[in-house]
Amino acid sequence: MEKAAKKELEKIALKARMGIIESIHAAKAGHPGGSLSCVDILTYLYFKQMNVDPNNPDMADRDRFVLSKGHAAPALYAVLAQRGFFDEKELLNLRQIGSILQGHPDLKKIPGVDMSTGSLGQGVSAAVGMALSAKHFGNDFKVYSILGDGEIEEGQVWEAAMFAGNRKLDNLILFIDNNNLQIDGTVEEVNSPHPIDKKFEAFGFDVLIINGNDFDEIEDALNKAEKCTKPVAIIAKTVKGKGVSYMENAVNWHGAAPNDELFEQAMAELKAAYAEME
């Protein structure tokens, strides 16, 4: 990737991280850790990869995206706002009565959201259905989804994977946000899904393993995925809480909002990182 293009994506991702922290602090609730870990993937998808139009969010030939780990909604909201689907000011209304931005994505209320998600495992099932529909009707759009590594402990994920592999849905690309932490501890402590790559291969997927917080590696993986003749699972090694020092690799920030002091610290760190790129 050209240096200037990468820098621009990194700046967008930093702004999105600020939006995540601001929205969760305003709501006094939310899931910052897993939102911060996957924001780089979302930034690349919405600003470089996917065929979407903020001025026509329901256009028939758009690429589809499903946030299967729906509790990371603050990340999706922040990126959608950066992309122009709605005003950034709306982020401060996260989880408020009457707001379009609730704790999980709602396709009926939020421009740019293709599937309501939250119950783990169900989002990827919907993504598989979208990919099958595209094949059935001869549409050429792609379907992308992000799953949590804790989420893939759900049996429904593997039913969906079995179907996708059996039908050779090469228009389906899954990202596994492999930050190794879930609400109760490490994924190994709770119910180890490893080896993740071998499991997806067994279900008929082509598998790629990348640093999910690196835009060059995200781009390289998606370029490779274009040539695959099977559904693709991209195992993205990420840092939970990426970008905020005290949240990084800290399980207690899976589902908690920063107080005023910690909010200021997080924003100062993110703003300093942004200023260095100017």
Image: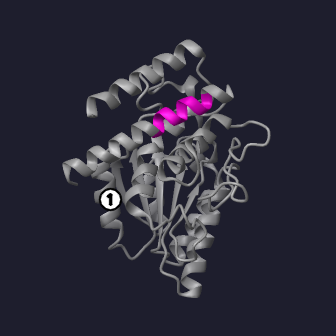
Residue 218, percent across and down?
34, 53
Residue at the far top in the pictured view:
261
Which quarter of the picture shows residue 254?
A: top right
Q: Main secondary structure of the magenta part?
A: helix
Q: Which residue is mark 1?
A: 221
45 or 267: which is nearer to us? 267
Dividing the image into 4 quarters, which one contains the N terminus?
bottom left
Dividing the image into 4 quarters, which one contains the C terminus?
top left
| Residue neighbourhood size for the residue with mark 1, other residues' Cα within 10 Å, grouped as few (<14), some (14–19), many (≥20) | many
Q: Is residue 176 left or right of residue 237?
A: right
The answer to whether residue 67 is visible is: yes
Amino acid type, label 1: Ala
Query: Is residue 22 magenta-colored?
Result: yes
Name the residue at 59% across, 35% down: 190
Name the residue at 47% across, 73% down: 171
Residue at the far left in the pictured view:
3
- Magenta residues, as a range? 16-24
The correct choice, above or below, for 229 with respect to 104 in the image is below
267 or 254: which is nearer to us? 267
The correct choice, above or below, for 227 with respect to 13 in the image is below
Query: Is residue 156 magenta-colored?
Result: no
Residue 158, percent across and down?
59, 60
The correct choice, above or below, for 84 with respect to 12 in the image is below
201 or 96: which is nearer to us? 96
Residue 120, percent across and down?
66, 50
